[in-house]
Amino acid sequence: MKNERTIPWYEVDTLILEELTQIQIKHIGRILEILGRYMLLSTEMLFEIYWRTYKEKLGLSFLKKAAREKLVIEYKFDLGQPTEREVYFYALKTSAYHALDRAALPYLKVPYFSSYEEKSRIITANQYMIDHSYVPDLKFPVPLSQTLKFFYVVNPVKQKIVGYFPNLVSQVAIERFFTKFETKEGTLDNISFEKITTEFIPFGSYTKATHPKNVFGTI
């Protein structure tokens, strides 16, 4: 029986190389690259980053197409609960990692067992990056903090920054962590620290992925 939520890697190649139109490849490829960098984004965040990166508006149809074709997860806030909202978040499916590998593009993965608290940190940190015109640093030699208490970013002048939540981790603790992975590119001398003190953006403790067949929007 065909899985209704995922597609195997060989079907990803068929989808992208044979079934999508060229304009769909262009925009969906960009969506996957952005989500591969930021891991998890709200609809508004994704549209803002797309505009800043490509100086074009992202059509909602391409985002919905990516979700229906099982390349992207669409989360709805507290789906099926009294607290449900028309708020959506997007992340990559396993099939999309294959596509990015085929395109030789780097990416970050949402830690496997991260729940609403960790996902809230991701989107809060991403909003902080957007507000300060920062981007996640995919070349940083230190592995992403699996606790998602701090994040590696680059500012417009290419300076390396660690943004962290001071109520969850101290700068001293991060510095101790860095000493285990010190390299020429990643010494503490080349890094500045910034506290992320904004209120956490809620992800919703009952938030779930919508089924691809229930992803609505223009085709």
Image (tube, grey):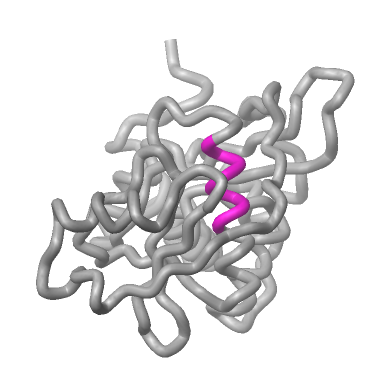
What x and y, as percent, mark residue 82? 88, 19
Up the image or down, 35 lies above or below 10; here it is: below
Up the image or down, 188 lies above or below 117; here it is: below
Frontmost residue, 208 versus 113 = 113
Query: Taking the image as drawn, is residue 20 in sight?
Result: yes
Residue at x 83% of width, y 28% of height? 84
Residue at x 54% of width, y 63% of height? 195
Single out the residue that lies furthest toward the front.
172
Frontmost residue, 215 versus 154 = 154
Magenta residues span 118-125
- Image quadrant for the N terminus? top left
Frontmost residue, 137 versus 107 = 137
**Total labels drawn:** 0
What x and y, as percent, mark residue 207? 68, 27
Single out the residue that lies furthest toward the top.
1
Query: Taking the image as drawn, is residue 99 in sight?
Result: no
Q: Is residue 137 left or right of residue 126?
A: left
Single out the residue that lies furthest toward the bottom.
157
Residue at x 58% of width, y 33% of height? 117
